[in-house]
Image: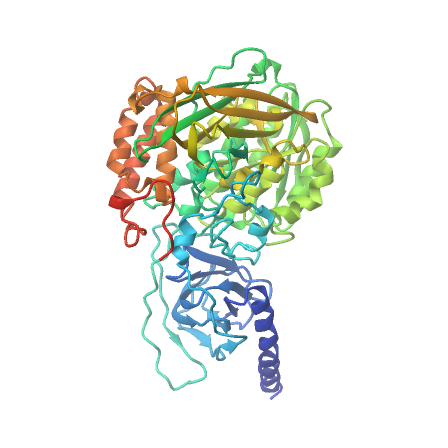
Amino acid sequence: MHSVARSVLCVFLLLFALPSLAQADAGTNPNTSTLIGTVRNAHQRRPIADVAVTASSPNLQGELRVSTDAQGSYRIPQLPPGDYTLTFEKEGFKPYTRSAIQLRLNRTRQVDVELLSASQEEPVRIIGAPPTIDVGSTTMGVNVDQEFIKRIAVARPGGKGGASRSYEPPDAMRNPHSVSLNGPSVSTLPSQPLGRPGLPKPPSAPRRVISAVEPSEPTKPPAPAVTPAPVSPFHMYFQGYGVNPTVTTEEERFSTFSVDTDSASYTLTRAYLERGSLPNEQAVRVEEFVNTFDYGYAHQGSAPFSVQVEGFPSPVRKGYHVVHVGVKAWEVPRVERKPSHLVFVIDVSGSMNLESRLGLVKRSLHLLVNELDERDQVSIVVYGSTARLVLEPTSAVHPHIIRAAIDSLYPEGSTNAQAGLEMGYSLAASHLVEGGINRVILCSDGVANTGLTDADSIWQRIRARAAKGITLSTVGFGMGNYNDVLMERLSQVGEGHYAYVDRIEEAHRIFVRDLTGTLQVVAKDVKLQMEFNPEAVSHYRLLGYENRMLTKEQFADDRVDAGEIGAGHAVTALYEVKLTEPSASFGTLRIRYKAPEGGDSQLIEKPLPSSVIRPAYGRATPPTRLSYVAAAFAEKLRGSYWVRPLSYDALFSLWEEIGQPLKGREDVMGLGTLIQKARTLDRRADRFEAFAPVSTMDFDRVPTLP
């Protein structure tokens, strides 16, 4: 009787609490809805924490994924109305999928479930869900084609002297569901902290569907098994930033952005394609495809940077030329590299217990140990539910001690990235190498479900220590349940580099071949600005760098952080420009940077002579052709409007024309292989054809919404 009374009381409390909860959800965005619920153990009736709850719908791009908290509760806010499928997964329990969940505008719907352990055979019971709750008006102001907004940024230039594109990364992180015609594209990320649901299934594992019965109708026979909607085998978290618009020089002739030497997006894409799947379009960042490749730039003279520029008629966009801009930092011989203290902060939580995760981390660190010498110290901090010190600062002249510490790592607990980074920064600060390299290196799949769970909050806690000159690099591992958003953002605010390791050869590139450039920063807060001559250029578009855009005024503002460049590293950017009247120069390139120790920025200025424009793609140098193929491949994978006329066959033909000996290089051959893989996998229809046929495509502007 007491248990019945408690149950009745809980029901009444729940019914009174739901309206206020729904109102809170509606206050975030009045034109969206929310899914909430609780997951319990069907046998013990206890809440289950860290259950992966995945929401999919035809109205969403990709999927939304959250985890249940310690009380077994989950919440997925700011959803567009429509039919949803929910999938519940956790290691040790049978997965359960419920489909045909109708979510109406401005409503909160509760879906509670009970999961069977893997050894049980009874069907999962769905706890009777209350009716949806109306929390406001059902009137929608404007009916906009969301798919179109997701794929094309229709940002308008800010007028004379303004930015060509608005960008507010903190807001995009806090409210990634928001749709703005002037900002980043719609994201599929939940605003709920991203949780870790435990060990992922192998991609090939079939999804089992368990029938369900409603306990409110005990005599009702079990419902037939429900076939779930297709679900991607890789639950990954990405943030999209749209596609840069084409800008007229009459409105804005300045294009300004922070440099980016990351390469994670290309490596992640390779991992997707080699597993037989197209990457999430929001995972594709053009600049990281382009900057993955070595274009053989030679640094000349005593200036900190050398500049290479070349152009040619666009093979795809009629009336436009492609302009390749390469900036090369000066080299530092390995023997002259500064001494270092490298603090590795390693995620050893449960889901890292895979050879492709913690196993690959350990093999990668063993490679690094071979490259260090008496100038270097290594420390290791690990974190699961809490952080602990595995290796205090140890000289690399004792590699056996470092190797033993690496080999001792084992998976444990949940994921408290905040605790790990705080301990790592504290260790780096207390053993600071004056005038040397002080670097924290995070090795993780990026998912955090304990402590602070987003990059900006974590950064606020460690900013004071980082101000001492300690930089943060992030290295990602693992496919499935991987948080690209957190890893990229942490590297940005930590003034470091973001890489992703999908194989031991990639670890060799980062920790062996490019070790000096990976570790030793030669210029910080590096910004590039192109000023186009309006008499020579009428329109332009920057390919990529959407989340690195700056205003014209921010270029000269030393308070504005920007990217870092390591010794010998290069930054490459491509523009599409529409040339008009012949002119001696079509623009000016400006580079602003600070010394690694900080201080006032310095300026380099280079005129761009029209003589660098070649008459045809085949007349450009092989490195310039390679950069275009890499950029065009990324544009095609992310569904850019501007490469619609480019087929995979045509793209592969451009790759074949790169020319020897560059085309025979292993990484360039790998690019050709990935293009062919994508050609066999990509069955997407042209989403613009119905209202903007390719045959009548306007190459100067995107179409107006129908």
Q: Is residue 137 left or right of residue 149?
A: right
Which image quadrant is residue 644 in? Answer: top left
Residue 148 percent location from the top left of the image: 39, 53
Pick out the residue farthest to the right: 430
Instruction: Name the foreground residue: 300 vs 312.
Output: 312
Instruction: Name the foreground residue: 47 vs 238.
Output: 238
Q: Is residue 222 above or below residue 628?
A: below
Pick out the residue farthest to the top: 301
Residue 51 percent location from the top left of the image: 50, 61
Residue lying at 59% horizontally and 13% vertically, measured from the top left? 335
Residue lying at 59% horizontally and 18% vertically, measured from the top left? 304
Q: Is residue 337 above or below residue 12?
A: above
Q: Is residue 683 left or right of residue 96?
A: left
Residue 414 seen from this side? no
Residue 153 seen from this side? yes
Q: Is residue 402 above or below residue 90?
A: above
Name the quarter where the N terminus is drawn.
bottom right
Instruction: Name the foreground residue: 468 vs 651.
Output: 651
Q: Is residue 564 above or below residue 41?
A: above
